[in-house]
Amino acid sequence: MVLKTIRVLLTVILTFTSAVTFAQLTNIDHVTVVKEFIDNIKNNNRQAIAAQVIYPFGREYPLKRIKTEAEFVTRFDEVFDQNLKNIIIKSNPKKDWTQMGWRGIMLNQGDLWIDEAGDLIGVNYETLKTKNLKKSLIERDKSWLQESLRNFERPVCQIKTKTHTIRIDEMKGGTYRYTSWKIGRKMSEKPDLLIEKGEKIVEGTSRSTRFVFKNEGHEFEINFAIEEEGIDAILTITKDKEVLSEQNAVFLNY
C-alpha cells in the first residue's frame, strides 16, 4: 500500500525537485477538497482537520509520530503555526496546489500534502515550536548516549530487532553511522558494533529509502520501504551477497 510506505519513511514527507513538473489543479473534485481544507484552516477547525489525517502522522525523528485524532488536536500548534496557516489561507487552489499523480496533492513546492480525498498526508514546513522541541530532544538524546557517540549532526532513528537496539545518525559530510547494542545493554555503554561512513539510498518514484553500511566484508542494509503492519524496517546482513540474517525491526521513541 503506497500510503503506508510514505508514512514509514523517516523523512516521512514527500519532496520533489523543481525539474519535475505536474499540472495545476483542474479536476473539480480535487479543487473542492483543497477548498474544504483551506476553510478548515481558516476557521481553525482543529477537530475537522484531525479527522482527516492519515495516522500515524509522521514527524521527523526525534519527534514522536502523532497516532490519534485527540493527540493531533493537542499537538496542532506544533504542526501549524500562524505563518503556515496564512500560507494555506492565502493560497489559490487552482494555482498554488498541484496534482502529483498517486503521490497526492501538494501545496507550493511541497510545504504540505493531502491525498485526493482531502486527507492530510504530511507537512514539510517546520514551525518554531517544532524546531525548539527537536533541539531539546536531540540534546536529551545526546545526554544518554555514550560520550564518544555524541558528535552526530542529526539523529535519524532508533530501531529494535529481536536481538539488537540500533541507531542511525547523520554525520558531518552527509555520511551515516550505524551503532548497535545487544538487547539488554544501554546506549550509555560502548556499542557492540559501530560502522562509519554508511550511505543513504533513495530510489524510485515512491522515494523508498534504505541505508547501507559495510564492515569487514559484511553489508548491513536497513530498508524502510515496508508495507506490512507492525514492521517499520528490515535489517538484512549479507556477506559475498549471501544473506546471513534478516530481521524485522520497529521504531523506538518515535
Image (cartoon, grey):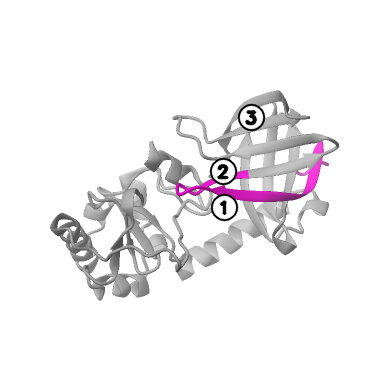
Query: Height in image: 63 above or below 229?
Result: below
Placement of the N terminus among the 4 image quadrants: top left
- What range is drawn magenta here? 187-210
**Label placed on residue 161:** 3
> Could you tell me which residue is drawn at 39 percent across and 40 percent down?
2
Where's residue 210, x and y in %?
Answer: 60, 43
Left or right: 36 in relation to 158 = left
Residue 181, quarter of the rendered image: top right
Q: Earlier in the sequence, mark 1 or mark 2?
A: 1
- Residue placed under numbered mark 1 in the picture: 62
Q: Are marks 1 and 2 in contact (CB under 8 Å)?
A: yes
Q: Amino acid at mark 3?
A: Thr
Disc 3 element: loop
Query: Height in image: 87 above or below 107?
Result: below
Q: Could you tell me how far apart the alpha carbons at marks 1 and 2 are, in whole angstroms? A: 7 Å
- Along the line of sight, the residue nearer the viewer: 133 or 166: 166
- Along the line of sight, the residue nearer the viewer: 245 or 144: 245
> Could you tell me which residue is drawn at 47 percent across and 53 percent down?
59
Disc 1 element: loop
- Along the line of sight, the residue nearer the viewer: 251 or 186: 251
Q: Earlier in the sequence, mark 3 or mark 2?
A: 3
Q: Is 132 included in the stretch rendered in magenta?
A: no
